[in-house]
Image: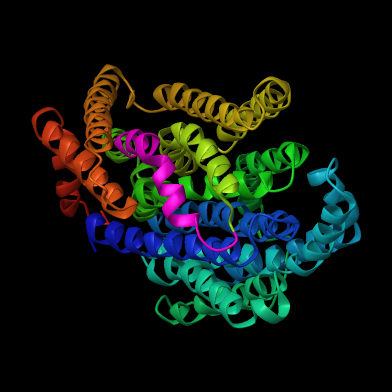
Amino acid sequence: MNILRASLTVTLLALLSRALGLGRDLAVTWSFGASVDTDAFYIASSFSNAAYVVVAAALASATIPLIVNEKSAAESTDHRSISNILNITIIALCIVVGAALLNSAEISRLLAGDASADLLARSEYFMLLVFPTIILLGSAGVLTGILNANSIFTPSAAAPSVLNAIVVLFILAFSQRLGVMAAILGTLAGSVVFFLLQIPAFYKVGYRHHWTISFRDQTIWRFAQAAFPAVAVALLLYAYAFVDMAVGARLGVGTVTAVTIAAKLIQLPQGVIAMGLTTATFPLISRLIGDGKIENATLLTARLSASILVAAVPGTVIAVVIGDQIVSLVFGRGTFSDEAVNETSRIFRVMVAALPALALHVILLRISYAMRMWMIPLVACAVSFAVKLVAAVYLVDAHGVDALSYSTIIASYLNIMIMIVVLNRRLNRPFGSAFVLRCLRILVVSGLAGVGTVLCRMGVSRLELGWSVWVEFIGLSLAGVFLYLTLGALVLREEFFFIKNLRKHKLNA
């Protein structure tokens, strides 16, 4: 299978997952509004999201180079070793969940310490119900790593969509009788299916599980050496959301919901832009680096990074211009009030400036892991998280909810700058002057397209045509895309045609 085909498959499934995730949030907000219940739900469900985004993704990233390098060295994949990794992972996650259950009250106070007693109590109760999903979703990360290392992407890419769909179905079926509890139960049921959905695909790779545990196996220690920094990195990145929740809870009821929704709106294009391409190319990059083909790895790194920015930068510009329409059209329904829509729009239009950095970080992280540079991303993320925390706390008194957006933007760009400097030294300068010129061209073209979109919006407003918001939104979106593609065809030919040439790159190269 070529990279383009695999990338499109994963991208389409990622888009479906993000769309269904958005549908899940719509079902929650339309049914329950921006209330204490929804704030408590988002605080509790952040742990199940963390299990997938943090633990599962990190363990998959640690598993793939391990298996790929074994194959590159002409060694047979030891199913007992992989089984040992999975068994110990499950036990470790059970221990973590047990500790969390015993300290749920303290965790609730940590995340919403200055909130009302009602919010604290509901958050604690919901967390007790959600904590088991950490075991299911976290363990699924190892399964994903095994499948992706064997160029099987569909089951693991489809699993998040199934989870989100189940949550939506539970809300539609039981919200009248159970309230927010319907979403909690849907999350539990969806997590079980998420784990089980990947099992049948293991017959394709000939995997057979062994119910044994051995700490003498050297594979488990190589895995641990990779897994602990990877989990720590992902946890630090996801902890941005915990900072926003803890600080946002001080700003009033509904702020946690508004910040969470804005961040999830940004995750939709981030997932579509970065996840498909990087998931499909991660095994190939690991193989190239493992085989010592540094020049090939350097070239692929530079081109993939530029391809991500080709989509992320104009997406950011257009989102800033029509972000208020996006939030209003998506969430301005049901019990979600106009005030909540306005606050969410304000947060989204500022925070979306971090999108290019968040999307680029995905490929930088995967390249670092392929090179087995586990500690560099950890240091970069630790520094950026410290900056995020200090900036959010320091700026909140002067800037209110905008402080959460500003701190995310500053921390995100600091993070990728640190990693770019290190990767330039370890590889053959993939982010040299040529890459900088590409970034400048992308930025200029995107800016011009944004200016054109603003002018179009001003013209529509002055003409008072009486168009519906949907028609205006679609028209402005198409205008922005058309302007960008037209200008890009003149200035960004090399970047545009690289995506087409991905068909020449095979996953087993």
484 in relation to 399, above or below: below
Question: What residue is at 66 percent from the left and 52 percent from the top?
Answer: 221
Question: What residue is at 64 percent from the left and 28 percent from the top?
Answer: 388
The foreground one among 468 and 174 is: 468
- The percent coordinates of residue 288 (x first, y second) are 33, 45
Tell whether position 326 is magenta: yes
347 in relation to 12, above or below: above
- The percent coordinates of residue 275 (x first, y second) are 40, 51
- Total tally of numbered discs in the picture: 0
The foreground one among 305 and 187 is: 187
The overriding secondary structure of the stretch rendered in magenta is helix
Q: Determine the image quadrant of residue 235.
A: top right
The foreground one among 313 and 50 is: 313
Which span of residues is magenta-colored?
313-335
Tell whether position 89 is magenta: no
The foreground one among 381 and 30 is: 30
- The percent coordinates of residue 277 (x first, y second) are 33, 50
Q: In the drawing, does residue 109 fall left or right of residue 311?
A: right
401 in relation to 67, above or below: above
Tell me if residue 77 can be seen: no
Question: What residue is at 86 percent from the left and 47 percent from the top?
Answer: 109
Question: What residue is at 82 percent from the left and 54 percent from the top?
Answer: 119
| Screen quadrant of the N terminus | bottom left
Tell me if residue 476 can be seen: yes
Q: Residue furthest left?
A: 490
- The percent coordinates of residue 446 (x first, y second) are 26, 30
